[in-house]
Each structure stands twice: as structure tokens, then as C-alpha cells.
Amino acid sequence: MPKTTCRALFKFAAFALLIVQSDWRLVAQTVSIDTSSAGQQQVIDGFGTCLSGTEASQTTWWTNLYYGDLQASLLRMDLTPNFKSPYSDNSYNSPSYGNPGPGGNFVRTYTNATTYTNLFNGSQAQIAVMGPNIDSNIACFNFTVNGGGQQVAGVTAELGKAVITNLGDFKLFASLWSPMPWVKVTDANTYQSGGANPPANGTPFPFIWLGNFAGGSLDVFGTPRPEFNDSALGPAEFFRLTAWLGFRGLNEAVHGELILMERLGE
């Protein structure tokens, strides 16, 4: 038998003998739970998930699992805006998957509303300028799946509401993960994740990638932009004002009223 093997067997035997002789035992930690009214408690609203795929479109098995077996009573959905044509043409004028745009990059970069409308690959992206007429503004958005039925999150939310008696409660949370792309400006950050057919490493934010609005900061500067000239529709800069309030106002909800007064006074 090779010397190396003998040494290994000897070490293993010695280790096993040490365990036997030391009466090695694992002792579990004792945990005490105070269920009295004086004990520290935390209220849990419920359990749930965020929908980002199409699983819930298979309503029978998914909803039985989610609302029936799991008894989930919370649902979070994405409120990132989807626009109708011409504002969303060519996936917001983005290179398509596997087909890079000018410069070999798979995204369209821009720095603000002005460069958002620059000519790119023979096309020019459009900006939806909105005013105080809510019905006219809503007409710019696409609230359905590819122009068809309801979005998955909406269908699932209705199903949750329908079984609210069995669940005891149902709460729907909405997250605006990104504003419309033309109200964003560069923030000095760059994409560095790599991968197959992605943006090139070092690509500055913000950019449009297959219809997704990636990165950048919300334009909250006080300088009016001609791209948002809505003087014929109502109070100036209505669109950027509402976008600003939607984000800064949520982050500073306690001071929301003061923020609104400040912006309206500019």
C-alpha cells in the first residue's frame, strides 16, 4: 500500500477515535417565546410576491397555488408605463434582440429629453406631451397586453379580491419601477454586467433596451424644456411636474404638500 494512503488512513482512524473518546454531542440552543400580552410582538400583514413574468396568466393552477395552498394575501405589481404608437414604435426606437444598432451596441443611449429624440438608425423617438386633461393623457397609454386583454397583474388582482373572504384580507401594492424615458437624465452611472447580446460594458445610463427604460435620474431641474411645451394644453410643464411629484413626492410623502406648493410656485 502506498505511504500516502497509509498516512491518510491513519489520520482518519485517529480522528474517529477522538470523536468516540470525547463523547461529542451537539447541543441545540434553547429558544423561549413569550406569547403574553407583555411580550414583544410584530404584526404581519400577510405573504405574497411581485409579478414580473407570465406565470399568473395560467390562472387555474397558479391562483389555486397562490391563493389556495399558500393563502397569499399580498400582491405587488409593476406600474412602469407602456405607451401606444407612435411613442412606443420600434420598442421605443431600440435595437432588437440579436441585432445591434449603430456602433454595435444593443441599446439606444441618451442624456435628456433633447437627445432622446435624436435620429437613431433612421428613426426618431416621439415624446408624449400631456396636459391637464386626464382623459387625453390616458389615451396615450397601453393598459393591455400587446393591445389585447388585461395585463397579468390586473387579472390576478381581481382574482385576489374575489377570494378576500377566504383570505381574510387582500392588499395590492404597485411599484413604479421607472418613469417614462424622456423625463430622465444622465446620472454618471454606467452598465457593467456583461452577458450575451446586452448593452456594452461602460454604456452610460439612461438607455432604451428592447423597450425597457434603464437607469438614469429623474429630471427635476427647474429649467423649462421646449420638448415639454404644453402651453396649448394647460399649465406649463404639467407632464414633468406630475412625474416629479410621483417620485419625489412618494419618497418625501411627509412633505408632499410643501413640495407641491413649491413646484407650482416656480
Image (spheres, rainbow, N blue to C red):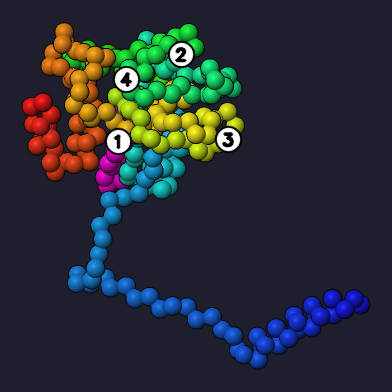
Q: Is residue 248 above or below residue 113?
A: below
Task: State which quadrant residue 231 falls in.
Answer: top left
Q: Describe residue 18's horizontal placement relative to residue 213 as left or right.
A: right
Residue 206's x, y, as percent? 39, 29
Amino acid identity at mark 2: Phe
Amino acid identity at mark 4: Ala
Question: What is the span of residues highlighted in magenta in the rendered image?
Answer: 161-179
The magenta stretch spans residue 189:
no
Q: Earlier in the sequence, mark 3 or mark 2?
A: 2
Q: Nearer the viewer, mark 3 or mark 2?
A: 2
Q: Secondary structure at mark 2?
A: strand
Q: CA distance from mark 2 to mark 4?
A: 14 Å
Mark number displayed over residue 120: 2
Q: Are marks 3 and 2 in contact (CB under 8 Å)?
A: no
Q: Nearer the viewer, mark 4 or mark 3?
A: 4
According to the image, label 3 marks what residue? 195
Which quarter of the rendered picture does the N terminus lie within?
bottom right
Q: Nearer the viewer, residue 188 or 36?
A: 188
Q: CA distance from mark 1 to mark 3?
A: 30 Å
Q: Are marks 1 and 4 in contact (CB under 8 Å)?
A: no
Q: Nearer the viewer, mark 1 or mark 2?
A: 2
